[in-house]
Amino acid sequence: MRCLIVNPNTSVHMTSSINHTMEELDKGDVSFDVISAEIGPESLESFYEYNLAASGVAYTLKKMDMQIYDGVLLACFGDPGLYGLKESLSCPVVGIAEASLSMSLLLGYKFAIIVSLQKAVPMMINMVHQYGLGQRMAGVFPLNMPVLDLEKDKVSVIEKIRQVSRKAIIQGAETLILGCAGMTGIAKEVEKEMKVPVIDPVSAGFHSLKAIIESKLTTARHGLYEPVPAKRIIGAEGRDSKYFGYF
Amino acid sequence: MRCLIVNPNTSVHMTSSINHTMEELDKGDVSFDVISAEIGPESLESFYEYNLAASGVAYTLKKMDMQIYDGVLLACFGDPGLYGLKESLSCPVVGIAEASLSMSLLLGYKFAIIVSLQKAVPMMINMVHQYGLGQRMAGVFPLNMPVLDLEKDKVSVIEKIRQVSRKAIIQGAETLILGCAGMTGIAKEVEKEMKVPVIDPVSAGFHSLKAIIESKLTTARHGLYEPVPAKRIIGAEGRDSKYFGYF
Amino acid sequence: MRCLIVNPNTSVHMTSSINHTMEELDKGDVSFDVISAEIGPESLESFYEYNLAASGVAYTLKKMDMQIYDGVLLACFGDPGLYGLKESLSCPVVGIAEASLSMSLLLGYKFAIIVSLQKAVPMMINMVHQYGLGQRMAGVFPLNMPVLDLEKDKVSVIEKIRQVSRKAIIQGAETLILGCAGMTGIAKEVEKEMKVPVIDPVSAGFHSLKAIIESKLTTARHGLYEPVPAKRIIGAEGRDSKYFGYF
Amino acid sequence: MRCLIVNPNTSVHMTSSINHTMEELDKGDVSFDVISAEIGPESLESFYEYNLAASGVAYTLKKMDMQIYDGVLLACFGDPGLYGLKESLSCPVVGIAEASLSMSLLLGYKFAIIVSLQKAVPMMINMVHQYGLGQRMAGVFPLNMPVLDLEKDKVSVIEKIRQVSRKAIIQGAETLILGCAGMTGIAKEVEKEMKVPVIDPVSAGFHSLKAIIESKLTTARHGLYEPVPAKRIIGAEGRDSKYFGYF
Amino acid sequence: MRCLIVNPNTSVHMTSSINHTMEELDKGDVSFDVISAEIGPESLESFYEYNLAASGVAYTLKKMDMQIYDGVLLACFGDPGLYGLKESLSCPVVGIAEASLSMSLLLGYKFAIIVSLQKAVPMMINMVHQYGLGQRMAGVFPLNMPVLDLEKDKVSVIEKIRQVSRKAIIQGAETLILGCAGMTGIAKEVEKEMKVPVIDPVSAGFHSLKAIIESKLTTARHGLYEPVPAKRIIGAEGRDSKYFGYF
Amino acid sequence: MRCLIVNPNTSVHMTSSINHTMEELDKGDVSFDVISAEIGPESLESFYEYNLAASGVAYTLKKMDMQIYDGVLLACFGDPGLYGLKESLSCPVVGIAEASLSMSLLLGYKFAIIVSLQKAVPMMINMVHQYGLGQRMAGVFPLNMPVLDLEKDKVSVIEKIRQVSRKAIIQGAETLILGCAGMTGIAKEVEKEMKVPVIDPVSAGFHSLKAIIESKLTTARHGLYEPVPAKRIIGAEGRDSKYFGYF
């Protein structure tokens, strides 16, 4: 079994963190590749950047041989462009946000999401409502640190997350989801002496994807993710010709 | 006052229909320009195409002088890339789907959306939940006609919409929203002898945008649509350099 | 185009404020009349007073020639008796509360309503749930000032609203709605240096109504607002005979 | 213990049916009076009529000595003007709709409401959402008979209700609520050979009110139903002077 | 009329408190028996204990002649095993939690539940969502006292409840429900000088049950509570043979 | 890694089917034991039976050495007694219903549950609301076959499920969940030529549990599933003494 882990931003550092988390996981006999988007913003903190990243990922995957993969994990909390990937690929595609939420449902009633910036609070609330999971949400809690700073000083990031987590628990959180791929690899540190599980989004994403593949299931080909036949792209001539392609 | 109407697909025919609707409207002293995306699919019937279109619109607007506009109308039902545009532009930006829904709330309790294809049914239901308006939805009803066919035979399209509308009314619809920019210009024909208002999305979108501009209001600069400072785009060198720009 | 603005209470001062706001608006070629209810309470702060006002407005409009109007705006936040007016009149009728809410949906995800008294907090929450918009509500925030005091000292009212607004923003508000016709005319003052739009209910109501009229739409004649044939009124003989009339 | 049963319309026939139901009930040692509104429509089938009735009931009760009653039952399904009465009276006030819904919650998971006319379907759905009980609603099912005809031919009304009830049960109803005071007195006939309880609204209303009185409880004096101090009524001079009074 | 009040735990003290409350109530001509479960935990503070109690109550009732009762009240807030009892018994069965909630709906818009321990907060929120009443909930507020301590020092319990209640009222509560059978008998003390009704769960439960019996209604025999034919119990041979019986 | 699969009913046949499914799965290096409850009903089709089974499972597990297991799967759709097990055991415990629902969220927007009997329809709807997943539910669809008959004629069961599934798809289902452990082992047959994934509840349950164990996570020890200290069980003397124990 082989999985593709897609970091939809272009931060080499973040891709390397994701790779590190993947190496540490109990993966059984699954092999994996971690890639970044070839083009796009270095971090994704707005819908505008999500839109650019969604297109950058399409460009990146279009040129690859996707037949060799049994599943794809989209490794940015916020799941940018996820629905489009589900339509386009025949293997299962899972976003780390939806997977973390799904797994949290089995571990506690109310989840909290820890995010880097205040701006992400309404973005995540919006996503949770789109996913129909509002009744299970205790809240979204910001660290007030930019995403790219998360990588710099792990010790103070962990301390800050623990502070914010205690506030979330008082407000009813029973599980804590680290709501950014940039927070991967520290869940066990955060969890120490806490009574609530702390979910690493890359780990939850990978294990959920693996569970789906082992269950021999894939995305519905009918309904929200039904594929649509490829269409001519106007205006792409004279540019990178395969730019806006279809799988 | 001057508005920009953006057709996020690249169908010249649809842009021309939108332009025609705009010319017929009671616009007071508002002037307007209608443009298509420079690059992207000819019609938008999937999330994959929404993602490409969102990026294509960003590319298109990036090169324009946006200071001359008092407001922007995104003229594709489904509002692809809308949140990103709201973040990026300082003038008000309205999507024709959100505007049609907002206006419908003032005309009847439950709305129905008429869409072209079955695939759009779950897409629109998803959007309505994301917008938090599920309690007001009577349903989404498909014509089972591709978007590009809507332009071809207006008489049978109108007849088909009237058939589907009667079904929607039996299921509780009190307002009917024509859920595709490709259906613009026929609302009054559909409405004849019906007891429910039929909402043209381009008209509703334009008049809602104008109401906002006349009220001297614009998008919140805090919260879901808070702008994020521009960031370096990796991987764009050697390509069309302004490709992934920011406003 | 000619609109009727109905202040459903009998406060001459408030009617005059509403008239002042109307005069200041960008109305294009629309003319308007502002009237008060002929009979009823001076301000509307309870359901009991809403009930009396609804009947007082019915009495007042019954004697007027409504054919000359293209639309009616009910200018009390709380929309007292609105559903009955929608049934009774063939032109569009819009309440300033529903219109402010609808417009806010296009400007930010979560709205807050600023109200005069604590009593109005559950009243507005109840109305928002009746309108099916609970997912978009950040909260309702009281000034703890009676409605009739709002007119007296504009400077301190504005300062108080700004204080309460900051609290609302911390609790997630992205738009602020001034939830009382008595607060009309000060939105721009409140908005200064804030990052969120402040909605004047009379302005939002008028511009929304105008948008509907320009879209050539009116209230659904089927469903919640379906008119019912006139019925004999028992007990009205020997009293003011046209009291409980029908349009 | 003494209760006042208020028929908010002016139909003598319906008041007499309500009285008949009351006489048949197991009332313990409770005495009761049944009155009609002195002024207003003969039946209440629209919000416009609800508004007139709410005001007519205020007028009627204003002249009475309300101190002699331990509780008030508002006997029109739709609960017109109920919130205002709850504010105004210190004894408990219960509407037959809210009481029937509350009692149904203890008897089955999903209730259906049987109504006379199609127009009442969205009206009742709106009320159920205002009351926050949408999750428990199987639907609202019309007989397509005017309210005043319900009194005429009991046998065919019962047969018609049984037909409609079977449809409701297929759609998930576990309790059936007769959604009109005009249907009082026939629940036991309807219920025969059915597996679901059929709730008479007058009976459910009275027994719920009695349960509250026996529990020595009354309406909250804080929150939605908080009373507001009496206010001058403008425009009432030279008319029936106590018209718009307060209790 | 005769009712059975079942305390599903085995605390003799709590059964005696319930009996005391019952004796004080205005019961008309209703006689009653109060029993404890024969086997099970002394107090019920977890789902694990709820499960044991549900089975202990089944065992206890199985040996009794249930034909002599007109109704059954399950007297533990949390309603453990309630759905199973509704299926099994032909007379009406009411839980004190569901009854308190139903009655509160008629007295104020938003209820708060006062509970003994923090652990009960998510348990009650879960129950309220299962009952579909989330829109009416202001919150669940803990005393942070074990259930069995509630019996010990009434004066300080009352003072503590009054403290917590004031907090609940600030957060929007309009009615207060004492969310534990161990808090029975003190509602009137708590209520003094408060503007909101305080609901004793045993009193509300009994009066609601009586209202149902007087209305000649019983649990639906179709839907969620439909009875299922008795089935062989495997593994009960050689044990207390009537252990897992059916009614 | 070693998992315990608990069939909470006492049907040897069903336990053997579950064992068969388990043997066929891609389990990596996980070993497993499948057990039945020692005591209780042969199939679980009512809440009454759920209550008995919950207690029977507690009895059964109490005597076992649970330290050797890394996780527990409760293998009855309906998750009877699940919350109590989550409280009692320190390793992760997953119910096949909650796991199937969680996995379905990653495969399609709306799920349908296929159940054996009509009675299970409201039971499952109730469970879905308790789990807060109503927005994702297309419906619950009955085969109208008793659970124990599901084992008898696999060919006609499969054909019947396919029929019912087509109906579910028309009503919006994008994933189909086989809502009974008795339907295990046939998902791939049902899925043939369908465009939607068919979820085997035992397989989804096992793989979800394994994903949690591999993620090194377990149930929250705070909130809804917080354990409560062991308490004396009254009335158990002279009976099987360890009957109502704690882990």
Image (tube, coloured by chain):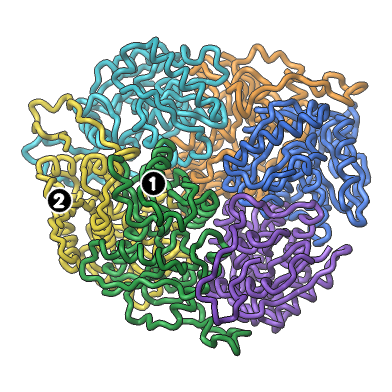
Chain colours: A orange, B blue, C purple, D green, E yellow, F cyan
**Element marked by disc 1:** helix
- Quarter residue D171 falls in: top left
Q: Measured along the vertical axis of the image, is residue F80 above or below residue B89? A: above
Three-letter code for the amino acid on which mark 1 is drawn: Ser
Residue E74's place in the image compared with D216, above or below, is above
Looking at the image, which residue sits at the far bottom? D238
Question: How far across and down, in percent of the image, does residue A27 sit?
Answer: 52, 20
Residue F204 has which mark? none
The C terminus of chain B lies in quadrant: top right
The quarter of the rendered structure image containing the N terminus of chain B is bottom right
Mark number displayed over residue D156: 1
Q: Image point 34% across, 39% down: which residue?
A: E224
Residue in the image at 58% along x and 16% along y:
A31
Q: Is residue B31 above or below residue C185?
A: above
Q: Residues within 10 Å of mark 1 (few under 14, many from 20)?
A: few
Q: Is residue B87 above or below residue A105?
A: below
> According to the image, label 2 marks what residue?
E69
Q: Amino acid at mark 2?
A: Tyr
Residue closer to the observer: E129 or D72 = D72
Residue A10 or C69: which is nearer the viewer?
A: C69
Closest to the camera, between mark 2 and mark 1, is 1
